[in-house]
Image (cartoon, coloured by chain):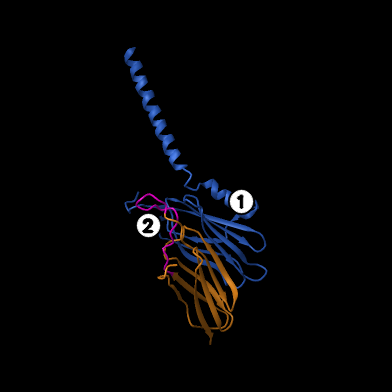
Amino acid sequence: MDETRVARSRRDFLMLSAGGLVAAVFASAASPVQAAVADVDALVTKMTAGKKVADGRIALELPSIAENGLVVPLNFTVESPMTADDYVKAVHILADGNPNPQIADFTFTPMSPKASAQIRIRLAKTQNVVVVAEMSNGEFYSTKKEVKVTIGGCGG
Amino acid sequence: MASNIKPRVRMPATAKAGEVIEVKTLISHEMESGQRKDAAGKIIPRHIINKFTATFNGKEIMSVDWHPAISANPYQSFLVRVPESGVFEFSWFDDDGAVYKSEHKVTVS
């Protein structure tokens, strides 16, 4: 009798401490300095004024594994004829795991032959990079890609 | 204002009328994010280039607002069309108010 009670209380203790550990991990992940997926969603909603965002039309090139989060090459191209009636007005680049979700906001004009650019960005940790394109006719397109950031190059 | 900030631009000096050419730009800048702390634990204030613009004969082609998540020594490449002979001007706007400019003449052959 006594033995089982001890066993149970030990198990309870272990479960409690494991629960506590999980809670602590979640608390640190949700610390206010890190942007969250919700922040990116809120920003996208603000940019699009709540309009529908379709998939496609954006080619996004990013490494799937970045050894150095300080310099991650990013290349995007938005499919568009780029004429005075039909062009890409803006392209927003966001990340859901950086302290500030915004990375860059491009403004294009029909003078640009192609809504395309290559930049180098900083990523604080493994996260999704989101690209939102705004067309001159008011349509929105979006795509995203996950980049695994290994710190110290040890494959973590 | 830092004095060692120098923009570099690579693009062809001649092109055919209407040709699309690639422009590669690089500027030396620390792009201090405002997130880092110094040895005393004090936050190092943000100091970045927050805007880049490209114009041709005074007309805007494209502009970009940069945020602290742009890497140090920002590199950017993009495409422009050359409708006629003229001057491309690229400008970088620093948080401290400085503007760095680079002009490139392209001749249509």
Residue A145 on the magenta segment: no
Chain B drawn in what color?
Answer: orange
Q: Quadrant of residue B54?
A: bottom right
The picture places residue A5, in percent across and down from the top left corner, at 35, 16
Q: Which residues are magenta?
A: B27-43
Q: Chain of mark 2?
A: A
| Amino acid type, callout 1 | Thr
Residue situated in front as seen by the camera: B35 or B24: B35
Secondary structure of the residue carrying numbered label 2: loop
Q: Is residue B29 magenta?
A: yes
Quarter of the figure that contains the N terminus of chain A: top left
Instruction: Return the residue nearer the eye: A137 or B51.
Output: B51
Among the chains pictured, the one given blue colouring is A
Q: Residue at x 48, y 82 (%)?
A: B13
Q: Residue at x 55, y 59 (%)?
A: A92
Q: Residues within 10 Å of mark 1 (few under 14, many from 20)?
A: some
Asked if both marks, 2 and 1, belong to the same chain, the answer given is: yes
Tag 1, which chain?
A
Question: Residue at left 65%, top 67%?
Answer: A86
- Residue occupying the far top of the picture: A1
Q: CA distance from mark 2 to mark 1?
A: 31 Å
Q: Which one is in front, A120 or B51?
A: B51
Contact? badges 2 and 1 (CB < 8 Å)? no
Mark 2 is on which residue type? Asn
Per the image, the residue denoted by label 1 is A45
Q: Badge 2 is on which residue? A: A68
